[in-house]
Image (tube, rainbow, N blue to C red):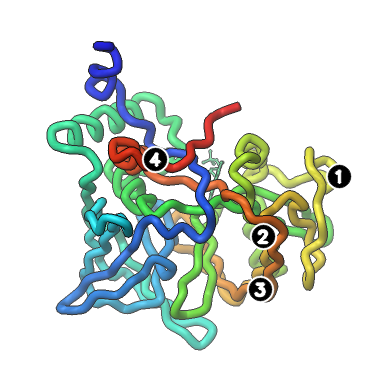
Amino acid sequence: MWKDWARPFVRPLPQWSVVAVAPPQQTVVASLRWGGATADVTTDHTVASLRPLTLATSLDAGPSPALEYRDRASGRLLGGLCLARAATLATGGTTLTLYHVATGGHRCLAWPLRPWNAWLQNRLMRNSGASPHSLMAPAATQQLMIAYLCPRPVILVSVDAPGHHNVFPMDLIGPLGRSGLFALALRSTNVSVPVMRESRRVALSCMPAAMKDAVYALSVHHRETLADWAALPFPVRRSRAFGIPAMAAALRIRELDIVHSEEVGSHTLFLGRIVSEETLAQDAQLHHTAGFHQAWRRRRGVPFAEVRPA
Ligand SMILES: Cc1cc2nc3c(=O)[nH]c(=O)nc-3n(C[C@H](O)[C@H](O)[C@H](O)COP(=O)(O)O)c2cc1C
């Protein structure tokens, strides 16, 4: 059908693809390269801030390393980011490095579709302003998509303190493997940031892909607190050590003891240690990846299972 053929030339790919992946994702390997050195950072880098776009890792890879994302099965380079060291952060007996993203590129689409798709996506962003990352310029959003070549898991974060209950979805999260720390990057306007800085405890629920709509609906709680845990449309269970209400339908519930928090650009970076972990079910977890990554996998006949709107 001519319309299927013409679609990529008139309509951009979706920026984000919501996919079902068995955790932890193994399909993409991330490596830092600097000087003559290379280090696997698949489980040791995460987004610390969206504006400016900043990544955190527990490695110091020099002033201007390259971050590469490769498909594990084929070894093919999917994309990469050129980083510029912005700061070091010492906490909990370890040192992290914060890198700004200088430039980036991907190889998921062939030329000329690659620049054309980016142009269409950027035009749509400028015209709608409706991107979930609308605080970012289009060029930085393109770089963020590259950082999502490593599919990012979605979790629900529960906060429970006297007079303050809340639960909201997050995907700017992840382990900083070598340091033993786990990071959450939360926009500083989030209503629970001051309470999290004070209480220093949260429960993290890893959510099944099938619960996408319910998880997304909770994003309103980035701006307003939850009146009552009983108001949630699904049951909760108390986390093991902290007794924080977490999701009974979660695949896994972890508790995070926050040891450090500080503002990094638009976001507050929370760093903590996982103090407990309960596995409740084995199933595919809700993840996000870049739309052009899913398109690349689809062309090869190995797409991620896609979670479509109900
Ligand atoms: C699945 C999902 C994951 C999200 N992850 C994060 C996150 O990790 N950090 C964050 O600050 N906001 C996160 N958000 C919140 C939104 O991106 C957005 O910032 C929030 O809804 C506030 O809206 P605003 O940008 O209009 O203020 C997430 C939202 C959804 C639906």
Residue 252's tag is 2
Q: Secondary structure at mark 1?
A: helix
Counting residues from the N terminus, which is met first, the one under dot 2 or under dot 4? 2
Q: Relative to 177, is 45 above or below?
A: above
- Residue tagged by mark 3? 257
Q: Which quadrant holds residue 292?
A: top left
**Label 3 vs label 2: CA separation?**
16 Å
Q: Secondary structure at mark 3?
A: strand
Q: Which quadrant holds residue 46?
A: bottom left
Say whether residue 189 is visible: no
CB within 8 Å, label 3 to label 1 = no
Q: Secondary structure at mark 2?
A: strand
Counting residues from the N terminus, which is met first, the one under dot 1 or under dot 4? 1
Q: Which residue is rendered at x = 53% and y = 31% of the image? A: 308
Residue 249, position as x, y percentages in the image? 73, 49
Q: Nearer the viewer, mark 2 or mark 1?
A: 2
Q: Residue furthest top?
A: 2
Amino acid type for the residue under numbered disc 2: Arg
Task: Report the number of numbered marks.
Answer: 4
CB within 8 Å, label 2 to label 1 = no
Mark 4 nearby-residue class (10 Å; few <14, some 14–19, many ≥20): some
Residue 117, position as x, y percentages in the image? 24, 31
- Residue tagged by mark 1? 230
CB within 8 Å, label 3 to label 4 = no
Counting residues from the N terminus, which is met first, the one under dot 3 or under dot 4? 3
Mark 3 nearby-residue class (10 Å; few <14, some 14–19, many ≥20): many
Counting residues from the N terminus, which is met first, the one under dot 3 or under dot 2? 2
Q: In the shown orientation, is residue 271 left or right of residue 6?
A: right
Q: Relative to 161, is 143 above or below?
A: above
- Label 1, ligand 1: CB separation under 8 Å: no
